[in-house]
Amino acid sequence: MYYRIMKILGIDPGSRKAGWALIEKKGRKTIYLASGTLRYDKINNFIDRLGVIHSSIEELMQKYSPDEVSVESLIYVKSVTSLAKLAQARGAMLAAIVPTHTGKVFEYSPNLIKSSVSGYGHADKSAIEKTMKMIFGKIEFATSDESDALAIALCHALNAGKTTIGKKTTKSSSRSLKSVFKDRV
């Protein structure tokens, strides 16, 4: 039986550090390939940091050649300055991705990501990490950004094609975690 193999890169954006994770979806199976954390906090000048963020994402895209990319949408933060920096960092990341992946970049809200992977839209970071380890095996995450990025990639594998940047498209059918991972149990 032929299954389309798709590599999905999940990115948890940040202006000081960003998590990334790569999974492969083959039919109903989803396999962990790699993950890590990109650190930008040693670069004091924020404008200079944006250039490094852009370059690091370009390198990641060239190294792993994902078919599709999923990113977390902007979150509510109390500080307008923090939100502005996060938005600019996310913009630098998207600017590195979109030229080669137009129509293949998807965004998901934090609550949808948490709900899709753990069943609870307000799960905390430790619950997400624990869920990722239960699904993919014993992975040692260096940061919660890394496990969050894996959750973002998995969310896309579970909800592929329901939301895309620039379009508001939705489908009503949704697959549960249990149905997706029934072959792995």
Image (tube, rainbow, N blue to C red):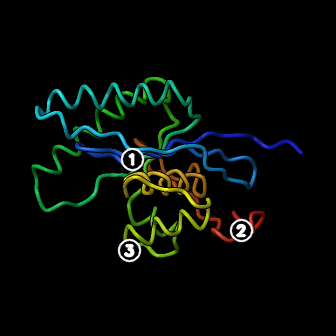
The residues tagged by marks 3 and 2 sit, at their Cα atoms, a distance apart of: 22 Å
* Residue pointed to by mark 1: 19
What is the x, y in percent for residue 177?
Answer: 63, 68
The amino acid type, in three-letter code, at marker 3 is His
Instruction: Specify the amino acid type for callout 2.
Output: Ser
Quadrant in the rendering for residue 2: top right
Where's residue 40, x and y in %?
25, 37
Q: Which residue is mark 2?
A: 179
Marked residue nearer the N-terminal end (1 or 3): 1
Q: Amino acid at mark 1?
A: Gly
- Mark before the other along the chain sequence, 2 or 1: 1
What residue lies at 37% left-to-right and 72% top-to-bottom? Answer: 124
Q: Earlier in the sequence, mark 3 or mark 2?
A: 3
Q: For marks 1 and 3, give the one nearer the viewer.
A: 1
Tell me if label 3 and label 2 are in contact, CB under 8 Å. no
Residue 93 locus on image (x, y percent): 34, 34
Relative image position of residue 91 (x, y in whole percent): 29, 36
